[in-house]
Amino acid sequence: MKKVILSIMSFMFLTLASNAAGIGYVNYDTISKTYPLAKKYTTDLNNKVKNIKTYTTQKDKEVANAKTPAQKANIRKAALAEIEKRQKDYLATRNRYEIDLTKKISVAVEKVRVQKKLDVVLNKDSVVAGGVDVTQAVLAILK
């Protein structure tokens, strides 16, 4: 009886193993550093941050040079409103860029998954061992 059970279990294991196409993984850090659109978006966001910092420094100097407390208060009030506006623009832009990149990368990953007949493609950070690195194939589609 044990031999029959072992035979059945071995057959099931071999059947399951032969049907499995595999697991792929993608290194998102590599994609974010290599994909031209991701690099452009990162540069745009960094420029927005730089502009906010430059504006803040400029307004700090204006406050320091203001003659009266009323002038200082007016400069601060206007500056805070402008900084808040710029921060909201930054956040909205970052959100729009993230959605766009996620969509484009997901489409490319799905194309690679189908081409390579993989069951699933995971983030590299989720893989402990094994799997097929499909990062370069995804980048090729994105470029």
Image (tube, rainbow, N blue to C red):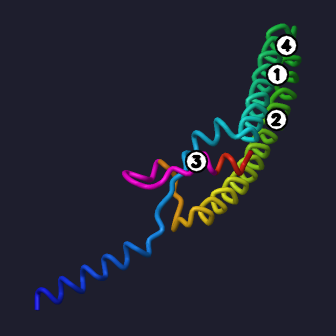
Q: Distance of mark 2 from mark 4, alpha carbons?
A: 19 Å
Q: Secondary structure at mark 3?
A: helix
Q: Nearer the viewer, mark 2 or mark 3?
A: 3
Label for residue 55?
Answer: 1
At horizontal 37% and vertical 51% (from top left) the residue drawn is 128
- Crowd class of label 3 (few under 14; some 14 to 19; many from 20; radius 10 Å): many
- Residue 67's x, y, as percent? 87, 8
- Residue 86's x, y, as percent? 82, 35
Q: Distance of mark 2 from mark 3, alpha carbons?
A: 35 Å
- Residue 34's x, y, as percent? 66, 37
- Crowd class of label 2 (few under 14; some 14 to 19; many from 20; radius 10 Å): some
- Residue 83's x, y, as percent? 80, 31
Query: Residue 6 lies in what quarter of the image?
Result: bottom left
Q: Amino acid at mark 1?
A: Tyr
Q: Nearer the viewer, mark 3 or mark 1?
A: 3
**Looking at this rendering, what residue extends furthest in the bottom direction?**
1
Point out the tag, 1 or 4, that comes first from the N-terminus.
1
**Which residue is under mark 2?**
86
Q: Considering the image in quadrants, where does the C terminus appear?
A: top right
Asked if residue 141 lies left or right of residue 13, the reply is right
Circles 3, 1 touching at the beta carbon (< 8 Å): no
Point out the tag, 3 or 4, that comes first from the N-terminus.
4
Q: Amino acid at mark 3?
A: Thr
**Which residue is under mark 3?**
135
- The span shown in magenta is 125-137
Q: Secondary structure at mark 2?
A: helix
Label for residue 62?
Answer: 4
Q: Amino acid at mark 4?
A: Glu
Circles 2, 1 touching at the beta carbon (< 8 Å): yes
Q: Amino acid at mark 2?
A: Arg
Asked if residue 3 lies left or right of residue 32, the reply is left
Circles 2, 4 touching at the beta carbon (< 8 Å): no
